[in-house]
Amino acid sequence: MRSFLAGALCLSVLASAAPTLSVRDVPQTEFLNVTYSSSSGSLHNSSLPNVLILATGGTIAGSSTSSEDDTHYQAGVIGVAALVAAVPDLLNISNIDGVQFANKNSGDITSADVLQLSKLINYALCRSHSNYTGAVVTHGTDTLEETAFTLDITLSCSKPIVIVGAMRPATATSADGPGNLLEAVTVAVDPRAKGRGALIVLNDRIGQAWYTIKRNANTLETFGAPEQGFVGGLLSYTPFWYYPATRPTFKQTFKIAAINTLPAVEIIYAHESYNPKLIKDAISDGAQGIVIAGTGAGDESLAAEPYIAAAVAQGVPVVISTKINVGCVVPSAGSDTIAAGFLNPVKSRIQLQYALANNYSMNATRASFEQVLGSMIGYGASG
Ligand code: ASP
């Protein structure tokens, strides 16, 4: 039986903790601008697993003067200690260390932030003597799928990273953040979460980060993978799993230890009469890769073809994804562009950044997107 007393004692330590206590295993000096609060110390419950919560902001940390305001509140206001203190049950299932990694609207999270976040999580979770069972990242939902995808393709061990957010601010009458956070930590300490990479948990559903996208701008039921579905869910805050741990077929992983900066990759959104000179302009402005959010299954306008050909001739990879966001751009042999397969534009952008940052050749970059699907369907990948 879980002890509420244990949770209450840990919580009082957390509430009184100075903001810069050290987090187990994570030397603060290596991660500047990161502040910590911690439930570690004499009241640490050695019978419970340890979870590292990294708070980045978003609606889950959002606040409004009105409990009916679900639209005009300010995101990224409430700190990690308050997020944890609002859910005392967390400390009945886990010791919690909290990192205030950022406190932003997720539209302001940068690729550099997420690289740093991944390095921090890999450091905390994946060394042989790590005490952490898993990590939970609280995040704004607008770019949550991007951060979750990045963490998924850069995680170097089998421990779970659970990314969680909320669609209603903490001040709302029916705020979803506290329940979602409890579900996220519950999933992070579930032994069956291991080996599944990064998971997205909101609204009683567990999705694999590689496939999961945000599907609705407003409703609680927003994250999902329309074709591939969920891997599990929660009933009364208890996880269940539809399948044993499995790896998304098309997932590629990337090393990050030697990466300090990520190259700019821009997404160009195709539509009737779009200006393909934007491709050239993006490259002139420093883009080292281009993703086109193409129409349908990645069709290109005739007007774009010379700009694409010029980019590729310059050695700039051009990945064609689909603005439909769901479905596949199929690789075809002999194409100068790279087919994104099942990666939507924002995820394609990230994969291209990490391929470029690892100095992949054009052929290796192509293979990272096309090879698995190409070999399955019998044509396509020329890498
Ligand atoms: N604008 C918010 C964000 O992404 C939305 C949310 O978290 O739901 O930070």
Image: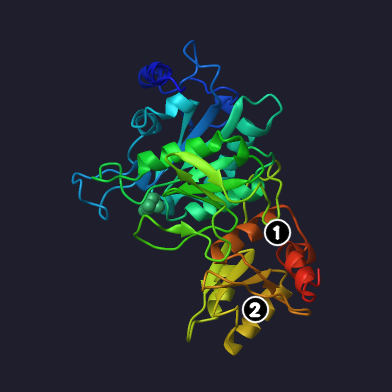
Q: Where 179 falls versus 247 (above or below)?
A: above
Distance in Å between CA atoms under marks 2 and 1: 29 Å
Task: Say which residue appears at 60% left-offset and 83% top-offset.
Answer: 300
Q: Where 215 falls versus 179 (above or below)?
A: below
Task: Say which residue appears at 62% left-offset and 67% top-offset.
Answer: 342
Q: Quadrant location of residue 86? A: top left
Q: Position of residue 293 (x, y in %)?
A: 55, 73
Protein image colouring: rainbow
Indicate left or right for 11 with 249 as reference.
left
In what element is the residue under mark 2?
Answer: helix
Q: Position of residue 32 (x, y in %)?
A: 53, 32
| Disc 1 crowd, CA 10 A, few/some/many (<14, 14-19, 20+) | few
Amino acid identity at mark 2: Ile
Amino acid identity at mark 1: Thr
Task: Say which residue appears at 53% left-offset and 61% top-offset.
Answer: 225
Q: Position of residue 49 (x, y in %)?
A: 56, 25
Task: Residue under label 2, please give it.
Answer: 308
Q: Is residue 285 visible?
A: no
In what element is the residue under mark 1?
Answer: loop
The label on residue 249 is: 1
Q: Earlier in the sequence, mark 2 or mark 1?
A: 1
Q: Is residue 227 visible?
A: yes
Indicate left or right for 154 with 181 as reference.
right
Given residues 75 and 218, the one toward you in this image is 218
Q: Quadrant location of residue 353? A: bottom right
